[in-house]
Image: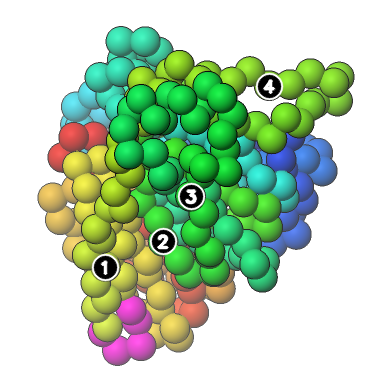
Amino acid sequence: MTEPMFMIPVFHEKIWGGTGLHDRFNYDIPTDHTGEAWAISAHPHGPATVVNGEFKGESLDTIWAQHREVFGNAKGDVFPLLTKILDAHEDLSVQVHPDDAYAEEHEHELGKTECWYVIAAEPGAKLYYGHHAQTREQLADWINNDQWDKLFRTVPVKAGDFFYVPSGTIHALGAGIMVLETQQSSDTTYRVYDWDRTDAKGRKRPLHKQQSIDVTTVPHVDPKLDITKTTVGKATITKFVASEFFAVYEWRTNGGEAHFSRGKAPYTLASVLDGRGELIVPGEQPYTLVKGMHFIIPFGIKEWTVKGDVQIIASEPGAKA
């Protein structure tokens, strides 16, 4: 297969969501509380659909199951990655995700390591990232006795920041933040705290205190990232992270062009966050790229070029994916 697969996002209403996905990307969102656009997803809770080419109208999970050659005959029962855009109109619940071993035993799916590229952040916006407990006993005491001011650690945030969030990390997006999230394909979330808020029927969402105590890494240590930038002409390629689960990059063409060759990764995921440009694949007509598009470059495409004035967040599966 020598053509990219462009995807239709799947939208999810959230108690903390807003209208930012429409306001910034002109998406046709279902409600004024839309929190997530699952951009490239084969997860059963929201598989994305291909809108062009040989597999037009088919869902990504079906293509993964029936046409593994598209992905270089990659192994694994499930498509390993999920990318989404989150619009935090209000604070998300403070949560933590399990690793693969715990998730497979208790939830029968992958664990969830993720990362965020910050698309936009209002002045004064902050993340909840990590915690202050020094032992698991202290963690359990603070969680069970609702000592949230002691427990939670906050970090200021601005557009262009990048955060790696390994499984076991207590975290939450604060109000006024929009991110592009790259994660393992899992929908397992353990809520530590949800601000005592209620839904339209006056009900609180359930918490998962014991699971949170079980899976949280203690003490918290910020991951060390080796962020690198490579400039060729006007284009800049930034590598944010290369982990066992995924590698994540930013492609900025800045009115120039960037050339890519297929490396060890069998396929590439890409989301256009800003600007306008073209994706050029040998033997194919150029594909127009505009803000809000999401696509997969399959195994059969060995070389490609991105040109114009465009910002893209791209990702590839890691060795463990």
**Which residue is labeled 4 in the image?**
205
Cα distance in 3D space between marks 2 and 4: 29 Å
Magenta-colored segment: predominant secondary structure: strand
Instruction: For marks 1 and 3, give the CA distance.
Output: 23 Å
Query: Is the residue under label 3 in contact with that under label 4 (CB below 8 Å)?
Result: no
From the viewer's perspective, tell me whether residue 18 is left or right of residue 153.
right
Looking at the rendered structure, the kind of residue marked 3 is Arg
N-terminal of the pair, mark 4 or mark 1, is 4
Nearer the camera: disc 4 or disc 3: 3
Report the residue that reaches farthest toward the right.
Answer: 201
Which kind of residue does numbered mark 4 sit on? Arg
Give the mark nearer the N terminus: 2 vs 1.
Answer: 2
Residue type at numbered disc 1: Ile
Of label 2 and label 3, which has the lower sequence position? 3
Mark 4: which secondary structure?
loop
Q: Which residue is mark 2?
A: 162
Image quarter of the C terminus: top left
For numbered disc 2, what is the local secondary structure? strand
* C-alpha distance separating marks 2 and 3: 17 Å
Q: Spot the residue most to the bottom.
A: 233
Q: Are marks 1 and 3 in contact (CB under 8 Å)?
A: no
What span is in magenta?
Answer: 232-236
